[in-house]
Image: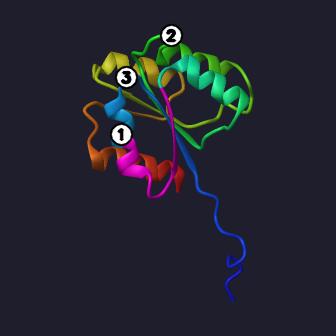
Amino acid sequence: MNNNTNSPEKRKTIMVVDDDLACHKIVQVYFEKDYDIISMNDGQEALVYLNKIKVPDLILLDMQMPNMDGRLFLRRIRRGDPNLRDIPIIFISSVSSEMFIKSVVDLGVIDYVVKPLKREDLMDKVHELLK
């Protein structure tokens, strides 16, 4: 007998924090079948949402955005509310220098994906973190 018959598994949520509309659309197309997607345009908007509404299972975070960039957003959630500190974060950025990647990993990101987003690379990383 299957014990999961009456308790459907809760869909996991991915928050995309990026000022690039194309990135939001790409993530939506790649993941909407398996996950709920929340789209935010910058770190400030995402921080307000996180503090008032819902904590996602994963954040895809861009570096360069208006109002609050990815680095400041990351510092705020890693040093702030204990409910937000452990959210896995994958940085997405067009910057690919080894020094830059090391600097964001030191801030507490789980992984890094270089834009333009490669479908298999991003999907593998997201599915691995959310399995």
Label 3, label 1: how many angstroms apart (C-alpha)? 24 Å
Asked which quadrant contains residue 111, the reply is top left
Q: Name the residue under label 3.
A: 101
Which residue appears at 30% of the width and 21% of the height? 98
Lower sequence index among marks 3 and 1: 1
Coloration mode: rainbow
| Image quarter of residue 66 | top left
Numbered label attached to residue 25: 1
Q: What element carries label 2?
A: loop
Whether residue 119 is visible, yes or no, is yes
Secondary-structure class at tag 3: helix
Q: In this view of the protein, which residue sits in the foreground, 55 or 104?
A: 55
Residue occupying image coordinates x 38% and y 42%: 27
Disc assigned to residue 110: none
Give 77 or 35, whichever is nearer the viewer: 35
- Does the magenta segment cover residue 37? yes
Inspect the image, locate mark 2, and give the three-letter code of the amino acid beneath it: Asn
Instruction: Tell me the amino acid under the disc marked 3.
Output: Ile
Q: How far separated are the C-alphas under marks 1 and 2?
A: 21 Å
Residue 113 at x, y = what percent?
34, 34
Label 1 crowd bin: few (<14), some (14–19), many (20+), radius 10 Å: few
58 left or right of 23? right
Write down the residue under mark 2: 67
SS label for mark 1:
helix
Q: Residue furthest top?
A: 67
Please provide the residue range marked out in magenta. 27-40
